[in-house]
Amino acid sequence: MCIVLGLDTFVSILSILASAFHFSNIPRIIIAIIHFFCSAWFLHCIGRMVGERVVFHKVYTRRDFDIFLGILVVVELVLVGWFFGGLGRVTVNVWWSLDICEFLALIAVGWVASWGPLEQREGTTMMV
């Protein structure tokens, strides 16, 4: 989780430093700060998750969430490598899209991880 948060913060810093600093970058800096705190919170939710979660009648365990964290590390490393590999004007939109999709996936998985374990939710029956 710390690796994902560190790489995500590094990607945000790289995107800010890619252009010269002026007042038009202030909203980007504010968004990067909000992005950091949201990422930290949802990574915390994933890290403290215990039990099983059911989404669309499919049971997800801790192992599935750990696999998701591993995929996030790979995506963040691709973003960093892509940046240092020469981010062209044509591919910059793809780079931003991948970063936004990764962040939205983190929000969705963190939200599911924040649910209570299946055994503790009242009135819930497992339908598999």
Image (cartoon, rainbow, N blue to C red):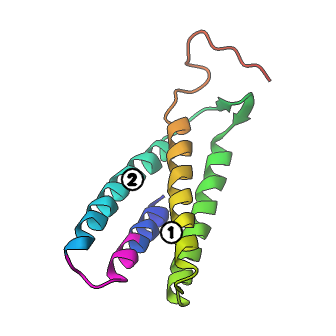
Magenta-colored span: 12-22
Q: Nearer the viewer, mark 2 or mark 1?
A: 1
Q: Where in the figure is residue 121, as x and y percent of width and height?
A: 56, 17
**Amino acid at circle 1:** Trp
Image disc number at residue 7: none
Tell me if residue 108 comes above or below residue 71 in the rendering. Answer: above
Q: Is residue 87 left or right of residue 70?
A: left
Residue under label 2 = 40
Query: For the residues marked 2 and 1, what is the alpha-carbon distance in whole angstroms?
Result: 20 Å
Q: Residue 2: say if magenta.
A: no
Residue drawn 50% across the image and 68% down it: 96
**Precedes in sequence: disc 2 or disc 1:** 2
Residue drawn 51% across the image and 78% down it: 80
Q: Residue 21: say if magenta.
A: yes
Q: Where in the figure is residue 70, as x and y percent of width and height?
A: 62, 61
Quarter holding residue 122: top right
Tell me if residue 61 comes above or below residue 123 in the rendering. Answer: below
**Amino acid at circle 2:** Ala
Residue under label 1 = 96
Q: Nearer the viewer, residue 70 or 83?
A: 83
Residue drawn 62% across the image and 52% down it: 66
- Around disc 2, counting alpha carbons within 10 Å, would you say few (fewer than 14), some (14 to 19), or many (20 or more)? some
